[in-house]
Image (cartoon, helix red, strand yellow):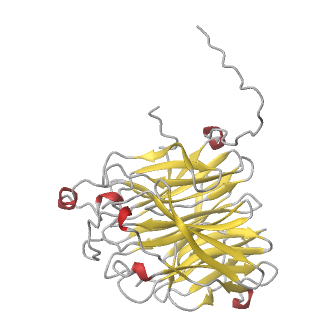
């Protein structure tokens, strides 16, 4: 069936010139009052990247997604939004220095506290999942030491922070950090070794980044985007495990696991009603094609970093994923629906995307778009098996 689920969209932000400023880090949250909150930031290509303060914009909506208005501008990058009852939080990184920081709003996103530093040192992530469990809130980060992040990402380390919900989340003493897990390296059988890492050529070193922390039947896992040989090997995620005894966060790498679209950032949400995990991913179509023809027309990065097809996926265990359908797509190689985040709202799934439509390239996106997938649960097969040994039901054949 050639059907796009949410090809029509609402534009929340648009760059006046993607060559000088482009969109990034879209995120959604909802308060118990029903208010929707969206955030996104403005990126600026070299040499202006991160040089301009107040990059993050906060938008709110009180009429079921109709009219959005800007309420605040925050000096935070790569954040996730989350709500604790009617209190709203934004956790991410400080611009330039990249410490882990958090800010709070007690009036629905209208005004915000100054960002409070939770942990020093340079860190990174993107709008990925936030997990509530046993009176704590968890979020993944990775370290990003000083240096060129295109050719140094194999040295980045994954970690998780946990905040005690019974305490003031702006107080660093309310938070703990796990041990750091080094990227284990990719076996040669998973890579052609086709590309050399190069900032100039936009080829990133093999690495894992932008982890999602989830609870799978009582086990905390982190699934991370995994870049292999400049995206030549797509569809592989890194899986880590986290245990929390109340004092120590024990974090370890488990394995690589096939996951469609895991070469690009993804955001996982769990739906209690269907008891399924849901995510949207960018599926590439031709990762082994020659790069030079694409480079000649201005395509950023190797072919595997194609971002023009955004697919909705669902899973029982967040490891084995099934396609529910195509959220949005373009046939133009320079266009993209990427870095999407999801929010379950009643019977529908809202998807916010970092989008390039008629823009500069598939990476330097010119829009933030909001998509609505109506009655999304109806798109899933019933994956839960039965374990009875009763007779197999007969299928009726009609003529």
Q: Residue at x 76, y 85 (%)?
A: 247
Q: Quadrant of residue 268?
A: bottom right
Residue 348 position, x and y percent, is: 65, 46
> Is 154 on the left or on the right of 37, as rendered?
left
Marks counted in the figure total 0
Residue 142 position, x and y percent, is: 52, 79
> Is 244 on the left or on the right of 308, as rendered?
right
In the image, is residue 71 above or below residue 98? above
Task: Give the residue furthest to the right.
Answer: 166
Residue 50 position, x and y percent, is: 42, 82
Quadrant that contains the C terminus: top right
Of 131 and 45, nearer the camera is: 131
Q: Quadrant of residue 381?
A: top right
Of 109 and 246, nearer the camera is: 246
Can residue 282 be seen at all in this image of the molecule?
Answer: yes
Of 321 and 145, nearer the camera is: 321
Residue 97 position, x and y percent, is: 48, 89
> Is 327 on the left or on the right of 109, as rendered?
left
Can residue 127 be seen at all in this image of the molecule?
Answer: no
> Is 156 on the left or on the right of 17, as rendered?
right
Of 144 and 79, nearer the camera is: 144
Q: Residue at x 34, y 64 (%)?
A: 191
Task: Give the residue furthest to the front.
Answer: 389
């Amino acid at each position: 069936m050639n059907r796009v689920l949410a090809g029509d969209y609402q534009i929340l932000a648009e760059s006046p010139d993607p060559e000088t400023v482009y969109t990034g880090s879209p995120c959604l949250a909802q308060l118990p009052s029903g208010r929707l909150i969206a955030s996104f930031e403005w990126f600026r290509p070299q040499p202006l990247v991160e040089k301009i303060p107040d990059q993050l914009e906060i938008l709110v909506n009180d009429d079921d997604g109709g009219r959005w208005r800007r309420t605040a501008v925050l000096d935070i990058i790569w954040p996730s939004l989350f709500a604790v009852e009617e209190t709203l939080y934004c956790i991410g990184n400080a611009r330039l220095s990249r410490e882990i920081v958090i800010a709070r709003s007690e009036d629905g996103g209208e005004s915000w506290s100054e960002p409070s530093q939770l942990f020093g040192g340079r860190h990174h992530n993107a709008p990925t999942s936030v997990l509530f469990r046993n009176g704590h809130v968890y979020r993944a980060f990775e370290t990003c030491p000083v240096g060129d992040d295109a050719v140094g990402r194999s040295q980045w380390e994954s970690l998780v922070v946990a905040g005690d919900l019974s305490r003031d989340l702006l107080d660093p003493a309310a938070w703990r950090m796990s041990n750091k897990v080094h990227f284990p390296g990719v076996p040669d059988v998973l890579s052609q070794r086709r590309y050399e890492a190069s900032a100039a050529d936009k080829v990133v070193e093999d690495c894992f980044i932008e982890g999602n922390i989830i609870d799978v039947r009582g086990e905390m896992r982190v699934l991370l985007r995994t870049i292999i040989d400049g995206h030549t090997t797509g569809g592989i995620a890194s899986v880590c495990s986290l245990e929390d005894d109340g004092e120590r966060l024990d974090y370890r790498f488990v394995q690589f696991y096939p996951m469609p679209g895991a070469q690009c950032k993804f955001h996982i949400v769990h739906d209690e009603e269907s008891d399924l995990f849901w995510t949207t991913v960018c599926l590439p179509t031709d990762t082994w094609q020659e790069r030079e023809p694409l480079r000649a027309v201005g395509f950023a990065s190797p072919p595997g970093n194609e971002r023009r097809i955004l697919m909705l996926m669902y899973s029982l265990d967040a490891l084995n994923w099934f396609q529910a359908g195509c959220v949005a797509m373009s046939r133009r190689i320079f266009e993209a629906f990427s870095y999407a985040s999801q929010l379950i709202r009643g019977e529908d799934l809202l998807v916010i995307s970092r989008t390039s439509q008629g823009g500069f390239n598939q990476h330097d996106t010119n829009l933030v778009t909001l998509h609505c997938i109506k009655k999304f649960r109806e798109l899933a097969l019933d994956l839960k098996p039965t374990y009875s040994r009763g007779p197999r039901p007969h299928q009726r054949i009609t003529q």
